[in-house]
Image (spheres, coloured by chain):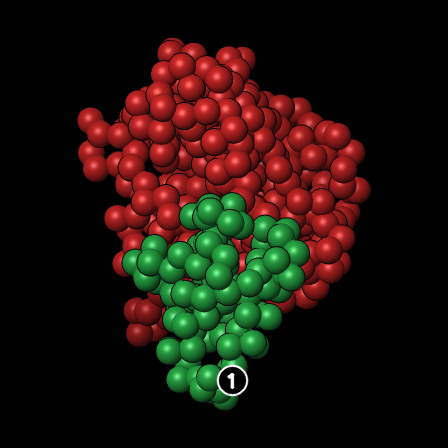
Chain colours: A green, B red
Amino acid sequence: MPAVTEQEILAGLGEIIEEIVGIPAAEVTPEKSFIDDLDIDSLSMVEIAVAAQDKFGVEIPDDELRNLKTVKDVINYVQNLSGATKA
Amino acid sequence: MSGTDDTGTARLRLPEAVPGSRILAFGDYQPARVVTNDDLAQRMDTSDEWIRTRVGIVERRIAAEDETVADMAVHAGGKALAGSGLSPDDIDLVVVATCSAETTVPSNAATVAHRLGIRAPGAFDLNAACAGFCYALAAADSAIRAGNARNVLVVGAEKMSQWVDWTDRSTAIIFADGAGAAVVTGSSTPGIGPVVWGSAGDQAHRIRIKDRHSFLVQEGQAVFRWATTAIAPVAEAACRRAGISPQELAAFVPHQANLRIVESIARRLKATNAVVADDIVRSGNTSAASIPLALARMIERGEVASGAPALLIGFGAGLTYAAQVIQIP
């Protein structure tokens, strides 16, 4: 698949999170923690992972999902697995 | 009359096929006892807020100690039969979808038929867990179109409460009891669309009752992921096969597993004009009963017009799933 930049993943994640949990995409910034800052619970994280899979073509299994605490963690995970280059 | 040709090969005759089938009426039944989230919070480590945000349930109905799956099936079946305008003598097949019956022998269907005054119908129980009602509806539709039955009573009835560990907060807050039924008849135009069904036996261990002395256990997060991933494409396929676009649906009635799953599937399906069933809020997860229960009450409240298309989709232990578009009676 074509390389995705960090900015593209961040924008995509923002859209997903806004649609699923109703938090404005602009509030989704790399340093935010899903649980502590965005108040997103484990079931919503599963939905976000499923939507991210559709959008970026990268599967995030439950075992991996547990370790992804911040928005930046997800960006890194997706970039590593999609073989993307840094913007 | 000769049933074989001159080489001794059987020549069988088939009844004339019927073009379609349709639902004449729904019926519902819920036990009297209401159990609120606060009631549960007194027995286990949970809270009203936790239950509402995680599964969307506010209260559920739990059957009396001596109230059986067959009792509830008779209530719902009787109501559907009365609404259909048919008499018990018109029914020649009874299917009860259940996974929580007190006994496996005898099945419930023959008993339910007898108690409703239906004489000598074909009768069987069907276990596809929470997908059971859609499987049973497909069986009824197929039997009618093949000419093997004229009028079918389809019931989904469950007493999940007797298989739940009332100290396990991962299941006790979810499951509940109830029954829903539909009367299906032959029709010159189809009122039940093609079923899209399937299973994922590799994930059988995710929802199970080990043996008759055990309680139901569920891997909640894995099931949630499966339901939010695999089910929307099945829903889309059922629409496609029936020739109805998701935007044309007047109602979307998925199995009431968890409000979060219902909302997630609805969002992915983009059935923007459909009333989405949220009966779980007051009824809990009643497995095979949830779809007919939700539909009966939607129709009773006048939320969907007669003749309008509604998409039903059941999914659950097995893992199994089944979906079809129906015409609202």
Is B32 displayed left or right of B160 in the figure?
A: right
Is B187 rendered above or below residue B268?
above
Q: Amino acid at mark 1?
A: Ala
How many labels were placed on the picture? 1
Task: Tell me the residue at 48%/31% (across/down).
Answer: B51
Task: Tell me the residue at 67%/59% (across/down).
Answer: B270
Q: Nearer the viewer, residue B243 or B55?
A: B55
Is B57 displayed left or right of B27 in the figure?
A: left
Is B197 displayed left or right of B152 in the figure?
A: left
Which of the 4 quarters of the picture holds residue B59?
A: top right
The residue labelled by disc 1 is: A87
Q: Nearer the viewer, residue B143 or B11?
A: B143
Residue A42 is at least partly visible in this image: yes
Image location of residue B279, percent across then percent down:
60, 33
Is B119 rendered above or below residue A58?
above
Image location of residue B58, percent across then percent down:
55, 26
Dot 1: what SS?
Answer: loop
